[in-house]
Amino acid sequence: MSEKPRDHHKGVVLRTERVSRYMVRVVVGGDGLRDFACEGFTDHYVKLVFPCEGVDYPEPFSVSEVRRTMPRELWPRLRTYTVRAWDPDACELTLDFVHHGDKGLAGPWAARAVPGDAVLLLGPGGGYAPDPGADWHLLVGDESALPAIAASVEALPEAALAHVLVEVDGPEDEQKLDTRARAQVSWVYRNGGRVGEALVRAVRELDFPAGDVHAFVHGEAGFVKELRRHLRLERGLPLERLSISGYWRAGVDDETWRAVKKAWNHQVEAEEAAAIA
């Protein structure tokens, strides 16, 4: 009897490092990633699978089978993270985690991770890469979007013009962004303020270059909504030139946000359509 095809990848932690005050990097590898592949996008993401402690799941383990046959409260919890880098030759997947103490699920896991720890993940998905035909690029986000922004900046061609605005708590949270492009990188400090407040202000004050812009704006849903309205209604960006999404929502966990995100997006789109009309 043949084994059912896996609906996930299983890797192992190879090494970890703290790349800034609140960012932990975990490099995953192993033979279980032999079928993993991502190319064409700079915002590839995976969903890490965290089985509930003390639950005996049927073997071979399958997320889809668990969801089909077991009560919802026993389903593994999923956390979405952007791929910082993928090295197909070494079969190494690099993921960056925001870590603020014991709060949350994936951040504390990453801070405790040691070589040999098992990692289950779904994906990858993705949908954005900088358009080489654009006159300039706008990349905006908080810490959750920093891995995708860093990967995007690295992918920009030498002649590309880009404005990069990243909001972090303070100077200790900056990271070096490697690029061949003419990229103006601005680190926006939160300094204890509401997430995205300073970032929205910085984008509003930015002197936009002339020409076609391809924009990437991701992070906490509240400020993303504000910036979407600003870019669409006040700056006149066509929706097809804008990759924009709320990666997370302040005050709710990932499961809760995923459950309401589709309705949230529909509401934002309806408000935008009414304003344009």
Image: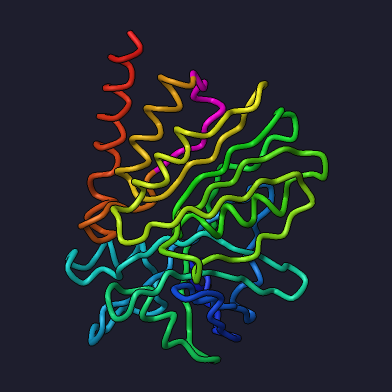
Q: In the image, is residue 70 above or below residue 268?
A: below
Q: Residue furthest top?
A: 277
- Across and down, in percent, residue 98 comes to 42, 69
Q: Residue furthest right?
A: 158
**Nearer to the camera, 21 or 240:** 21
- Across and down, in percent, residue 172 comes to 50, 71
- 159 vs 242, left or right, is right
Image quarter of the C terminus? top left
- 28 vs 204, left or right, is right
- 256 vs 207, left or right, is left
Q: In the image, is residue 42 above or below residue 267?
A: below
- Across and down, in percent, residue 243 comes to 51, 37
- 113 vs 149, left or right, is left
Q: What is the image's colouring?
A: rainbow
Q: Which residues are magenta?
A: 236-245
**Residue shown at 61% from the left, 72% from the top:** 33
- Across and down, in percent, residue 234 comes to 43, 20
**Residue shown at 62% from the left, 41% from the top:** 163
**Residue shown at 31% from the left, 35% from the top:** 265
**Residue shown at 41% from the left, 50% from the top:** 219
Number of marks: 0
Is 98 in the magenta? Answer: no
Is 238 in the magenta? Answer: yes
